[in-house]
Image (cartoon, rainbow, N blue to C red):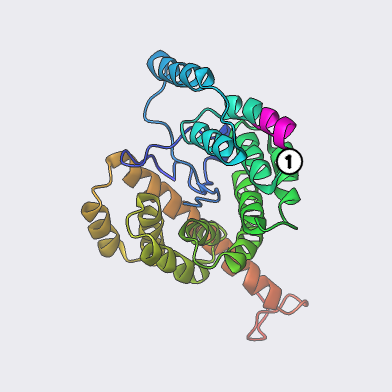
């Protein structure tokens, strides 16, 4: 779950998902970053635009090959027409049968329309297929959207093992680790993601969050200036940095408690006063 980036307009995810694509404003998608980008506007004009896009898509005849049909459904989802895409997925599977590709599209549409349990079932169906990495990533995004960043880290870690050069997955994993309070563990996947896809504003935002979490405020400001982040994005990143700091403190306390003697004494052997 990530803050709204004008240069990367994204569709509105289900309310529960704002990270993930991992940040309240930034997708987990875990993208964190999973946290998800918000649409550029709300209200009647935006609704009218989406309705017009959906009407135009539905006027198109169904393609006559499986590959073309899947490409059409994917394009509809990129336009934010997730409900319409579910109807077309039903039509596709009725004509051609269920495939891992259609299952992935269904899982994504269910997640984006707030049907988390059905989405998780579809993502799990991908685990024994060649699209297992996408299945684990989807499960990670769902976990992050539900506030379970530990579960998100585990699922996204599996996805990263299966797809080690996928920048989005690495960014989501890094964001999830930040939200879990594991700042050190977030460094490598986030820097890998930044080098693999340096043009992604969402990934760069997660790198800024990493810098903030490391106490490197000057470098974070410089990167935000370089990428021309808006005031809203900067504010969202500061909010997330506070959440990361809180999680890191809790993680440190849990670690200290786990290592403390059970008789109530401190590690130095002195009784607490």
Image position, residue 61 (x, y; %): 54, 22
* Residue 188 visible in the snapshot: yes
Q: Nearer the viewer, residue 48 or 131?
A: 131
Q: Give the secondary structure at mark 1.
A: loop
In the orientation shown, which residue stands out farthest toward the bottom? 268
Image position, residue 204 (x, y; %): 35, 56
Q: Which residue is mark 1?
A: 98
Q: Residue at x 55, y 57 (%)?
A: 176
146 left or right, relative to 21? right
Q: Which residues are magenta?
A: 89-96
Q: Residue at x 52, y 70 (%)?
A: 185
Residue 226 is covered by the magenta coloring: no
Q: Residue at x 32, y 38 (%)?
A: 6
Residue 90 is covered by the magenta coloring: yes
Image position, residue 10 (x, y; %): 43, 37
238 left or right, relative to 174? left
- Is the residue 38 above or below the residue 240 in the image? above
In the orientation shown, which residue stands out farthest toward the right? 263
Q: Nearer the viewer, residue 168 or 251?
A: 168
């Amino acid at each position: 779950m990530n803050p709204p980036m004008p240069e990367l307009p994204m569709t509105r995810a289900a309310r529960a998902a704002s990270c993930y694509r991992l940040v309240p404003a930034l997708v987990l998608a875990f993208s964190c970053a999973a946290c998800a980008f918000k649409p550029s506007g709300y209200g009647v004009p935006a609704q009218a635009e989406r309705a017009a896009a959906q009407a135009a898509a539905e006027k198109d005849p169904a393609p006559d090959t499986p590959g073309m049909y899947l490409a059409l459904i994917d394009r509809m989802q990129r336009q934010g027409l997730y409900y319409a895409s579910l109807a077309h997925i039903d039509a596709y599977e009725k004509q051609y049968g269920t495939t891992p590709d259609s299952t992935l599209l269904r899982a994504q549409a269910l997640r984006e329309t707030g049907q988390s349990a059905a989405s998780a079932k579809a993502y799990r169906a991908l685990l024994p297929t060649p699209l297992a990495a996408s299945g684990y990533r989807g499960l990670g995004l769902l976990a992050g959207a539900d506030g379970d960043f530990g579960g998100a880290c585990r699922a996204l870690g599996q996805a990263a093992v299966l797809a080690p050069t996928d920048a989005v997955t690495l960014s989501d994993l890094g964001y999830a680790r930040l939200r879990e309070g594991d700042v050190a563990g977030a460094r490598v996947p986030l820097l890998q993601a930044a080098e693999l896809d340096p043009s992604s504003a969402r990934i760069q935002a997660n790198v800024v969050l990493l810098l903030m979490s490391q106490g490197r405020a000057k470098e974070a400001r410089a990167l935000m200036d370089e990428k021309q982040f808006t005031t809203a994005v900067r504010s969202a990143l500061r909010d997330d940095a506070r959440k990361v700091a809180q999680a890191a403190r809790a993680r440190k306390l849990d670690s200290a408690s786990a290592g403390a003697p059970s008789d109530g004494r401190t590690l130095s052997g002195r009784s607490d006063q």
